[in-house]
Image: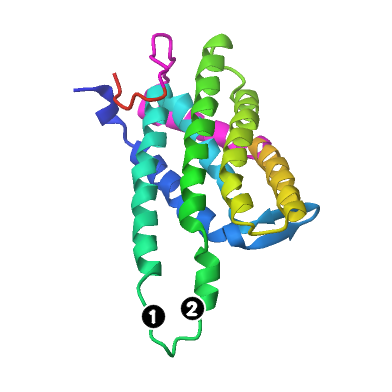
């Protein structure tokens, strides 16, 4: 039996990871201001998804992290499909909140599809860098590797994911640009902050799972799903 079936806490990590994405999409239409940052409310959740894949790659290896990224895709598509059906079911004529409901979920399907494309590309780059740099520095400096990998992966993901909001003209271009810059700046700040508790979680998980994978002979093809 493959060692991957003996992991005790991996499913908990996956469950937390997948549950973040509907909250991110729902919060897309609600701009917020935190100090100098002009954001969407979903933006404050997204850094958690990157740090969770960092943890998975660091503890369980590139192959497991890659599988987590691919597994979330059908889960999100299933959610978006159900949401699409729900949005097109006719409500009672005396219901007064349809316009509010429509605004919240307007463009969610298109934005969700582009967001998922950005997630796959950005996250694959992220875990590739984490795993390769782990070998290079012999497992040290996770916090620095996490910040460096996230700065690249998050820029890719954000660029692809925000194209849907730009196409749908959810905000004027100047506001879209301010939100883009603010989200990326917040993500860089969050990557640094979250790397501290993530390091502690990694130490605990490695001890509890009895595993610390180095991807010396790993096939880094991002389109493979099976774990060898």
Q: Nearer the viewer, residue 24 or 115?
A: 115
Residue 139 disc label: none
Q: CA distance from mark 2 to mark 1?
A: 8 Å
Residue at 59% over, 24% down? 142
Q: Is residue 125 left or right of residue 86?
A: right
Q: Is residue 193 left or right of residue 53?
A: right
Q: Considering the numbered disc 2 on the image, is that residue within a helix, a strand or a loop? A: helix
Which numbered marker is on residue 98? 2
Q: Which residues are magenta?
A: 192-221
Q: Is residue 138 magenta?
A: no
- The answer to whether residue 44 shows anywhere in this view is no
Q: Residues within 10 Å of mark 1 (few under 14, many from 20)?
A: few
Instruction: Please identify the dominant SS of the magenta region.
Output: helix
| Residue furthest right as drawn | 36
- Residue depicted at x 43% and y 14%: 215
Q: Which residue is mark 1?
A: 91
Classify residue 146 by image quadrant: top right
Tell me what residue is drawn at x 48 percent, y 50 percent.
112
Sequence order check: which comes first, mark 2 or mark 1? 1
Give the percent coordinates (x, y) of residue 26.
Answer: 52, 60
């Amino acid at each position: 039996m493959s060692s991957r079936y003996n992991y005790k806490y991996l499913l908990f990590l996956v469950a937390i990871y997948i549950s973040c994405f509907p909250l991110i999409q729902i919060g897309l239409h609600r701009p917020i201001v935190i100090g100098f940052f002009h954001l969407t409310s979903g933006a404050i959740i997204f850094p958690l998804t990157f740090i969770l894949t960092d943890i998975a790659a660091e503890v369980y290896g590139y192959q497991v992290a890659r599988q987590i990224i691919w597994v979330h895709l059908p889960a999100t598509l299933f959610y978006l499909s159900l949401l699409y059906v729900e949005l097109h079911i006719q409500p009672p004529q005396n219901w007064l909140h349809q316009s509010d409901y429509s605004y919240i979920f307007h463009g969610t399907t298109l934005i969700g599809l582009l967001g998922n494309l950005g997630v796959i590309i950005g996250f694959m780059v992220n875990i590739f860098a984490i795993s390769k740099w782990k070998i290079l520095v012999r497992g040290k400096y996770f916090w620095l590797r996490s910040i460096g990998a996230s700065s690249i992966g998050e820029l890719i993901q954000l660029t692809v994911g925000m194209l849907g909001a730009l196409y749908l003209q959810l905000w004027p271009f100047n506001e879209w640009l301010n939100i883009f810059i603010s989200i990326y700046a917040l993500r860089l700040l969050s990557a640094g902050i979250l790397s501290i508790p993530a390091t502690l979680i990694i130490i605990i998980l490695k001890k509890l799972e009895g595993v610390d994978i180095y991807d010396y002979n790993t096939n880094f093809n991002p389109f493979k799903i099976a774990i060898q």
